[in-house]
Image (cartoon, rainbow, N blue to C red):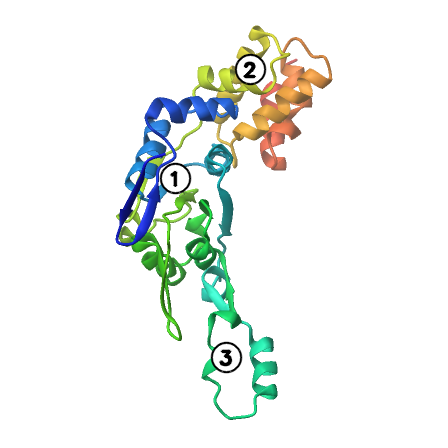
Amino acid sequence: MAQQVASEIAHVRHFTNTEQVAQDLAGMKYLADNATSQAIFLADALAKPLLLEGPAGTGKTQLALSVAEITGSRLIRLQCYQGIDEARALYEWDYRKQLLAIQRSEDDDVSNVFSEDFLLSRPLLDAVRSEEPVVLLIDEVDQLDVEAEALLLEFLSSYQVSVPELGTVQATRTPLVFLTSNNNRELSEALRRRCLFLHVDYPSPEREREIIAARIPELSDQLTGRIAETVAALRNMDLRKNPSVSETLDWAQTLSLLNVTEITDEVVANHANILLKHQGDIELIRSELAPTS
């Protein structure tokens, strides 16, 4: 691996070209198209965060998990939610430990309790302080409100975290950073311009057939093709939540376990609760597939 040092941050590249990315992901049974492989290669080569945006269930999170395993990196995950604050995303002080230190102190000087010994790292600071390779997954960033989103900007710009009592904590090596968004709200331009961008959509029927075949090879080519076609048709319906890739795989595994060799309307109706997780969607599908008298 080539090593480059810029602004005192070691940049260790994991991939030599786009083809290596695709091959390594395929080894993890994650079948990436050229746009995905290229985006990961460039994020690694340029040391830039990669924003993955698209519908829920298209494999965005799994992509980051696969890259962490491929590169042998430590995975650090920040699961975003409404109301998250600095103490959950960046760091907080160990107040109990500080209080004990003050009580044991023989003088009134409390400045020593604001040292790294009393600092609790949360995901962003943890990624900065890590001495081993890191893949940082900032998952569902669109769940944050605008104020909380601003907490990410310094880190995304320069891989550093400012702690007023200590100064700036700078990463010693660049982490690979993935942000995922289900596009539930528009992200700020400030965040977007700090990242490379990749839209991740549902795979085409042919690509999904290949994914099924890679994960569940015991199924026939004909059956995997019919599964992919059926799921694609469901996604074109007016559903509250389309079937995800993982739900497609769950259904394919179900068909294998039950020794189903042919997909009929009755099979789809009976298994609707595996592909769909809202009762309204299940009832819609079953009514569409119900035999007419």
- Looking at the rendered image, the disc whose residue lies closer to the viewer, 1 or 3, is 3
Q: CA distance from mark 1 to mark 3?
A: 42 Å
Dot 2 crowding, Cα within 10 Å, few <14, some 14–19, many 20+: many
Dot 1 crowding, Cα within 10 Å, few <14, some 14–19, many 20+: many
Nearest to N terminus: mark 1 or mark 2: 1
Query: Residue at the right extreme?
Result: 258
Q: Secondary structure at mark 1?
A: strand
Q: Say which amino acid is labelled 2.
A: Ala
- Looking at the rendered image, the disc whose residue lies closer to the viewer, 1 or 2, is 2
Q: On the rendered image, what quadrant is the N terminus found in? A: top left
Q: Residue at x 60, y 87 (%)?
A: 103
Quadrant of the image occupied by residue 124: bottom left
Q: Say which amino acid is labelled 1.
A: Glu
| Side of 211 where 264 appears, left or right | right
165 and 235: which one is in front?
165
Q: Residue at x 37, y 31 (%)?
A: 15
| Side of 33 where 92 appears, left or right | right
Q: Secondary structure at mark 2?
A: helix
- Looking at the rendered image, the disc whose residue lies closer to the viewer, 3 or 2, is 3
Query: Vertically, is 25 above or below 162?
Result: above
Q: Which residue is mark 2?
A: 213
Q: Secondary structure at mark 3?
A: helix
Residue 155 x/y as whole percent: 35, 56
Residue 206 makes an appearance in the image: yes
Q: Which mark is residue 113?
A: 3
Residue 278 x/y as whole percent: 60, 37
Residue 195 x/y as whole percent: 30, 45
233 and 56: which one is in front?
56
Q: CA distance from mark 1 to mark 2?
A: 26 Å
| Side of 214 where 151 appears, left or right | left
Quadrant of the image occupied by residue 40: top left
Q: Which mark is residue 53?
A: 1
